[in-house]
Amino acid sequence: MRPLRIAGGEVLLPEAGFVADDLWLVDGRIAAYGESGAAVLDARGLKVLPGIIDIHGDAFERQLQPRPGVDFAPALALAETERQLLANGITTALHGVTLSWEPGLRGIDTWRAVVEALHARAWVCDMRIHLRWEAYNLAALDTALADIAAGHVHLLAFNDHTPAILRRVPHPVQGAKYSDRAGMSLEQFRALADAVGARAAEVEPALDRIAAAARAAGLPMASHDDATLAARETFRRRGARICEFPVAAEVAEAAAAAGDYVAMGSPNVVRGFSHLGWASAAAMAEAGICRVLTSDYFYPCLLLAPFVLAQRGVLDLAAAWALVSANAADAACLPDRGRLLPGLRADLVLVAGDGDRPRPVATIAAGRLAWISAEGADRL
């Protein structure tokens, strides 16, 4: 791999903030010195930022199933997703792959196919698996435990959408949303949901087993959509130190006070509100409660959100960028990235513009020029 010099940009350094300097990339790492024969990318007028780390993104599901009943092979879906990630400055992505009792998009066959496709080749973006474990999926517990032990899972999140599904499935329109996604008739899906719901007494012991497996594997864990303090504390005792998308502000505040990572969606910041009517991610970040932003369902928002926060005037861009880089790396237990320091993985995004119109110019993943715009190509 040819060394690369990022010349004359505004480099975001830990503690120091933005510094006009050159950055050297050698053998996939950030180097403290230069080498002769390096390629040069003229970064004058650009911000040189750590590559974005997305610890929860499920927009790739739209590549797997762009319409209900229309499915594409995971290899194709992941390849297209990788292009979107790199074009938006995301160099590490933990795909939120749901392993549910529902057949189809979130079922065990799709899970197996995605795991196989992800490990079948080397990717430029470091794409990993965030297992969204549905609590009532007792039939797939052994599969999940085996994949955790095999190293196929990089973050475990506890999800429980079953009670909400059971409430909605009797309604013909709301129920059709789930049955269409599963590729079943509504009557078949209702019968399946009722059978799954009847095993409620077995859920807590299963959660204890999968949490123990995750602890043994050293995986970071998250609880999802916590609505009450009691629910959050239950998952915290199991080892979940990430509280993602808390429903109530008091839950987020308690998690932050306990030293846990509160993760929220960057679309919430960019749009100015939650599409579900929950707490403002921007306000939570400014209060020091939300420490990690994720793409959730729309990749471009992860690059835009820190600039939106900086424009609001409470956080500067360096502090806001940590929400999508350094803090995300810490939450996901990835100490080799998220900051521009010698010896760390050379993941960067070069950004032009400011305010509400930033635009990525080039993305570098593990020292490789992974994506470049026409403007960036002119600067090589």
Image: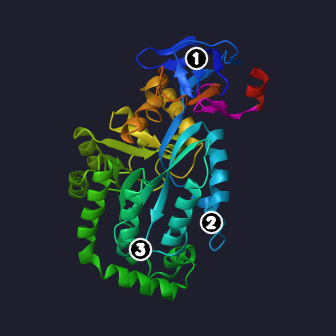
Point 44% across, 30% down: residue? 322
- Please tell me whether mark 3 or mark 1 is closer to you in this view: 1
SS of the residue at dot 3?
helix
Labels 3 and 1: the sequence-earlier one: 1
Labels 1 and 2: the sequence-earlier one: 1
Q: Position of residue 216 (x, y in %)?
A: 28, 52
- The kind of residue tagged 3 is Ile
Q: Main secondary structure of the magenta part?
A: strand
Labels 3 and 2: the sequence-earlier one: 2
Query: Quarter holding the C terminus?
Result: top right
In the displayed structure, 138 sits above or below 332; it is below
SS of the residue at dot 2?
loop
Point 63% across, 51% down: residue? 81
**The one of 68 and 368 positioned closer to us in this rendering:** 368
Point 28% across, 41% down: residue? 260
| Residue underneath mark 1 | 23
Query: Of the numbered discs in the image, which one, if any, rests on residue 65?
Result: 2
Gap between marks 3 and 2 measured at Cα: 20 Å
- Please tell me whether mark 1 or mark 2 is closer to you in this view: 1
SS of the residue at dot 1?
strand
Image quadrant of residue 227?
A: bottom left
- The kind of residue tagged 1 is Leu
In the displayed structure, 86 sits above or below 319; it is below
- The kind of residue tagged 2 is Gln
In the displayed structure, 190 sits above or below 327; it is below
Gap between marks 3 and 1 measured at Cα: 51 Å
**The one of 293 and 115 positioned closer to us in this rendering:** 115
Q: Are marks 3 and 2 in contact (CB under 8 Å)?
A: no
Using the rendered image of the protein, determine whether residue 60 is visible from the camera's viewpoint.
no
**In the rendered structure, which segment of residues is drawn in magenta?**
354-373
